[in-house]
Image (cartoon, rainbow, N blue to C red):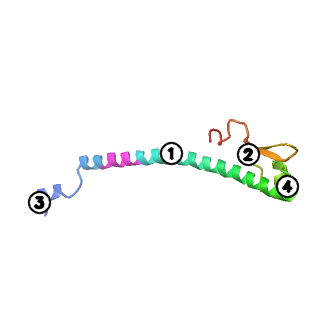
């Protein structure tokens, strides 16, 4: 048989368990707050990549057609796989210059990037 002293040392006390739970709670709160901004950084990177893709497609289109094209021409010409939902192309100077701008709208994740 175990003695009374050996039985008391066999498990954790309630205080020890509560301390471990509090420490785990603090660590999980730190992780949640540090991971929260990752999505915002990903959206910013996606917006920059979307704009760079359109600019590259415009330059490739210019090399073949000797003029810049709108989003529809880039898509039908095979220079873009799909239309951008975040950016639009504004042509000027008889299609010799272009500007890539944000599409206006409250749901555009590129606002503020």
- Seen from this angle, which residue lies furthest bottom? 1
Q: Are marks 4 and 1 in contact (CB under 8 Å)?
A: no
Observer able to see residue 63: yes
Of 105 and 71, nearer the camera is: 71
Estimate the spatial distance between the alpha carbons at disc 1 and disc 3, rounded to whole Å: 52 Å
Q: Mark 4 points at which residue?
A: 76
Q: Going 86% across and 55% down the picture, which residue do you hit?
A: 66
* The magenta segment: 20-28
Task: Tell me the number on the disc at residue 3.
Answer: 3
Instruction: Indicate which disc, 3 or 2, sits on the residue closer to the N terminus.
Output: 3
**First in residue order: circle 4 vs circle 1:** 1
Q: Position of residue 89 (x, y in %)?
A: 78, 45
- Across and down, in percent, residue 39 comes to 56, 47
The residue tagged 1 is: 36
Q: Give SS at disc 3.
A: loop
Q: Nearer the viewer, mark 3 or mark 2?
A: 2
Label 3 with label 2: CB-CB less than 8 Å: no
Q: Distance between the residues labelled 3 and 2?
A: 74 Å
Nearer to us of marks 1 and 3 is 1
């Amino acid at each position: 048989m175990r003695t009374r002293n050996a039985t008391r040392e066999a498990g954790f006390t309630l205080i020890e368990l509560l301390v471990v739970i509090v420490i785990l709670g603090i660590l999980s709160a730190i992780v949640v707050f540090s991971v929260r901004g990752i999505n915002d950084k990903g959206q910013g990177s996606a917006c920059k990549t979307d704009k760079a893709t359109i600019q590259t497609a415009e330059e490739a289109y210019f090399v073949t057609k000797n003029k810049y094209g709108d989003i529809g021409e880039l898509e039908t010409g095979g220079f873009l796989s799909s239309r951008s939902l975040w950016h639009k192309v504004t042509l000027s100077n008889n299609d010799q210059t272009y500007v890539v701008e944000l599409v206006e709208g409250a749901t555009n994740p590129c606002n503020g990037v």
